[in-house]
Amino acid sequence: MASTQSGLRIQGDDNLQSMFVGTVMRKIKSRTWKKQRYFKLQEDCMTIWYKSKKAGNAGSTFSVSDVEAVREGHQSEVLLSTSKEFPADRCFTLVFRGRRGNLDLVADSAEEAQLWIRGMRKLIESVENMDQSEKLDKWICDWFKKADKNNDGQMNFKEVQDLLKMMNVEMNDDHARTLFKEADKSQSGTLENEEFVLFYKMLTDREDVRRIFQDYSGDGQKLTLPDLEDFLREEQLETVNVQRRALDLIERYEPSDTAKNLQAMTFDGFLMYLGSAEGSIFNPQHQGVYQDMNQPLCHYFISSSHNTYLLEDQLRGQSSVEGYIRALKRGCRCVEVDCWDGANGEPIVKHGHTFTSKILFKDVVIALGNYAFKVSEYPVILSIENHCGVEQQRVMAQHLNQILGDKLLKNTLDGKVPSSFPSPKDMKGKILLKGKKIGGLEESMSGMVDDSLSGEVSDDDDNQHDDDDDNQHHDSIRRRTKKSKQCMSKELSDCVVYCKSVSFSSFKNSRIRAKFYEMSSFKESKALKYTKEAGAEFVLYNARQLSRIYPNGMRTDSSNFNPQDMWSVGCQIVALNFQTAGVEMDLNDGLFSQNGRCGYVLKPAFMRSSERGFEPDQPQNHTGYQPLKLTIQVISGQQFPKVSIKEGSIVDPLVKVEIYGVPKDHAKQETRYIDNNGFNPVWNDTLNFIIHTPELALVRFLVEDYDKTSKNDFVGQYTLPFLCIQQGYRHIQLLSKDGTSIHPSSLFVNVKITKHT
């Protein structure tokens, strides 16, 4: 089992051996909260256990698989705040996946810090390199430890019964006892390591997959090469080099050398293939950058964040550079800063007229320089909402130039006045500033802007003051601050090239007078109004210019709007609160899961034309209209997590399939629910949808715990673009609310896509 393999790894590694013994380190939460904790690597080499001196034997744990990275030195605001007390070589930060807060630690010596840094990095690398079998091994080992209450390496039948409840399955005691006796090869009345593995395999026998296997197997024991080819053609709808494909799958997933030599696949190999990336519903060919990246910037949807500095709500939430790091590491390509005059001549970033904390603009720029291109090499847009006076605007420009250097795009690419946007490929590795600009691009390039000239800049990002504005809180702020106009410094103005912020007047005015590099921001309510009243014009506008959509100010809890409404009219920069989990961020993650997760997705051809606007409400009017029928058979589920803390509670799962796209495509259907089985439920329910605009459709699979008396509880979800779907028998690996994997939780489905007539 996994623990035995881990033990062998420990013996050969001094860092892990020392972590296994344990170390006392300081856990730092703030300048005043610094407490000693004893940290120790558990025997499974996958779990870190820690406790305080006062806690006795009680303690807490976290999994190595939850840790995304290790940062050395003062690379967090907390450790920076204590830098005078603790030198950098003793400090490090464990960065967790999802929205979980980081863990800042200080070792007693630089040597001890390095020991943990090297050890954790090795363990993280080990987890990332695990194959399916090893991940399953680890999962089984984790359950074994949870069920083995007295830690004797054995499980009696009572412990097995408790385990089944923990694993989300309600099973007849007689059936459970039968499996227990079959697995108890030593007839000791208990299950030891390998016996428990056998018990687990009997418990998780995939009868649904076995039936498919036997349908194509001549002898019921294996798939010959022709058998596997038939399956790939008839069920998976593969047509290109099918024999070579079948041989490749056998080589990659078949565990038996004997079967490999026969060019055959056993049931175990078949199950491994269906659970792999190639057996996933997401087409592996779309996982890399596969789209044309040479189109003008305005022809792409761009992953975008609103109030990026916030980790929580926008009234009292914490501001942190961590917000920028997390967003950029999720592929975000447009981040926002709200800049205000700060003490000691240093501009600060915060949410104005609220109780949010503040951070230095300089620190944001440093984080941007360090993390902008870790995940994607394509350009990042820094959207500035500027509330600073001229002097601190000059400081902002100085920081941007000195810290970002050549990464900051300050001139057109060829030094000439352009007539259209360059492409993402042309601007690889560049950071573009979006903000107010004195005059136009033509004047600044010709030197016609006088050094002493200052232009007026409003303190509002969206300079539209509508009578129907539902943002009463911000309206009152506007009434207080509208009287004072701020001037624009030439130094900061010069940093703006392709993204000049302007107030929106009308689509007609933009069509006649606007320059391509002039872009406007729209609050969600105004943008939604335009999508309904002038959808085709909005599409045409977005074929020429960039638009940015942001949440209404009344969303003080940092909730989000449905971004699909804005993508359906071609809006590129649809800015969401990345810190807030929910269906809206699921859709954002789903759209940008394709094209190498680079943060840019090419808009459909019919949204890139400046001749005729696509009508989202009338998709049948566009050239090439061909609706498709999507048929999804939801077959089964595997190992769903428990969602209720009630004693003995077991999930009653149902599956919802939701379609998001143009208004005609919005649809939702669900399976029946299964009583008391979150472990291996079987539905075999078929759901049908008509997709009118496949190019814009997203499909979301949602698993819920049915509750007849109240709202269903969330179990897991997975969202992907319709055009990235692989047909045939496919597994769907579920994600948590945070968008992180909850392995091995999955759905097993059969997908068919046909023309709708």
Image (spheres, grey):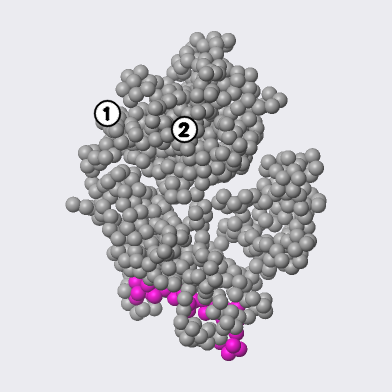
The quarter of the displayed image where residue 65 is located: bottom right
Toward the bottom, the furthest residue is: 187
Membership of 198 in magenta stretch: yes
Name the residue located 39 percent from the left edge and 21 percent from the top edge.
Answer: 515
Left or right: residue 688 versus residue 194 is left
Q: Position of residue 21 (x, y in %)?
A: 76, 64
For label 2, the residue is 472
Q: CA distance from mark 2 to mark 1?
A: 39 Å
- What is the count of numbered marks? 2
Which of these two is toward me, 413 or 698? 698
For label 1, the residue is 611
Question: Residue 692, can we see it?
Answer: yes
Badge 1: how crowded within 10 Å, few (<14), some, or many (20+)? Answer: few
Q: Amino acid at mark 2?
A: Gln
Name the residue located 52 percent from the left edge and 54 percent from the top edge.
Answer: 740
Which of these two is toward me, 273 or 680? 680
Upstream in sequence: badge 2 or badge 1: 2
Badge 2: how crowded within 10 Å, few (<14), some, or many (20+)? Answer: few
Q: Position of residue 545 (x, y in %)?
A: 39, 28
Mark 2 or 1, closer to the camera: 2
The boundaries of the magenta stretch are 185-214
Q: Amino acid at mark 1?
A: Glu
The quarter of the displayed image where residue 516 is located: top left
